[in-house]
Image (spheres, rainbow, N blue to C red):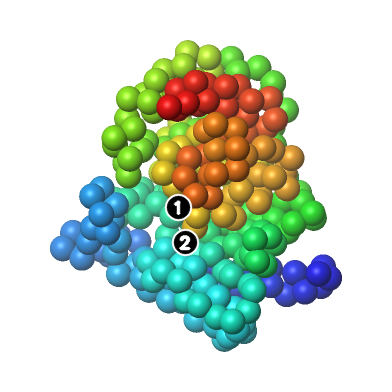
Amino acid sequence: MHNKELDIYLRSAIKAAKESGQFLLENLGKIRLDEVNSKRTFDFVTHIDLESEESIIRCIREEYPDHAILAEETGEKAAPGAYTWIIDPLDGTTNYIHENPVFSVSIALKYNDELLLGVVFDPNRNELFHAIKNEGAFLNQNKISVSKIDDMSKALIATGFPFRRKDLIEQYLNSFAEIFKLCAGIRRAGSAALDLCYVGCGRLDGFWEIGLSIWDICAGVLIIKEAGGAVSDFLGGNDFWGSGNIVAGNQIIFENISDITRHAFRS
């Protein structure tokens, strides 16, 4: 594929993400508690998620009517082509409901099984992360790379609590305890897409979480890889797309976290 084609797709993704992000900002603080619904226990959705997603899908459909779409709230919209857009219209819904300003919009594009580009937009900080396969990762058009910290005692690590998999709380807490003993600090912000981007630009040195969905991580995974980092599932393989169990970081910190998750989740 020519870079010019990818640039066109990237411009579309950025346009959709920024329009959606502006919509999220305009409606922040306007959700009533009786407007919050549960998709499943501890997992919430609002009309803002749905309208944000509709806005992104509309942008994509106008330009690429033959592309498939996989979106968090509306599921899969099949199309005959091999291109699939993967959309999270509001990553950090619980934060958003509480007016906690840590949330983002995530959009990725795949061709068959090949991840071509990813965009994550933080409307509160007006920060746009993006990556194109084999062309690097960027924050507001400036190239980024993972941190160079190679000592866990100096590493800042992010995580997400397993609210969708509370049956795995014991294994998770075991991994948390081991990592906590070794690292400089652990943070839990509430938007996995942003956590992955922060690993990509060196604000974080590593990250691990249980049970994420493909739309949570698709763009962020490409951003980390293009920024020189590493990503795997808890056992060191590539099943994070299916399991949603993910470890990420710069090469050294990634290996340190992976050693711990392999031990904690080996069964």
Classed neighbour count for the residue bearing mark 2: other residues with Cα under 10 Å, few (<14), some (14–19), many (≥20): many
Q: Answer with the quarter of the image where residue 132 lies.
A: bottom right
Q: Amino acid at mark 2?
A: Asp
Residue at the spot of label 1 = 213
Label located before the other in sequence (1 or 2): 2
Q: How many marks?
A: 2
Q: Residue at x 66, y 44 (%)?
A: 224
| Residue 102: x %, y % from top left | 43, 48
Q: Residue at x 53, y 50 (%)?
A: 241
Residue at the spot of label 2 = 88
Q: Nearer the viewer, residue 201 or 113?
A: 113
| Residue 142: x %, y % from top left | 74, 51
Q: Residue extending furthest front?
A: 267
Label 1, secondary structure: give it: loop
Name above or below for residue 262 compared with residue 84.
Answer: above
| Residue 121: x %, y % from top left | 55, 58
Q: Amino acid at mark 1?
A: Ser
Tell whether 220 sits left or right of 214.
right
Q: Is residue 73 visible?
A: yes
Q: Residue extending furthest left?
A: 34
Label 2, secondary structure: give it: strand
Tell whether 88 sits left or right of 201.
left
CB contact under 8 Å: marks 1 and 2: yes
Give the quarter of the figure containing the C terminus.
top left
Q: Residue at x 50, y 65 (%)?
A: 87
Name above or below for residue 220 compared with residue 116.
Answer: above
Q: CA distance from mark 1 to mark 2?
A: 10 Å
Q: Residue at x 59, y 78 (%)?
A: 67
Q: Answer with the quarter of the image where residue 218 lies.
A: bottom right
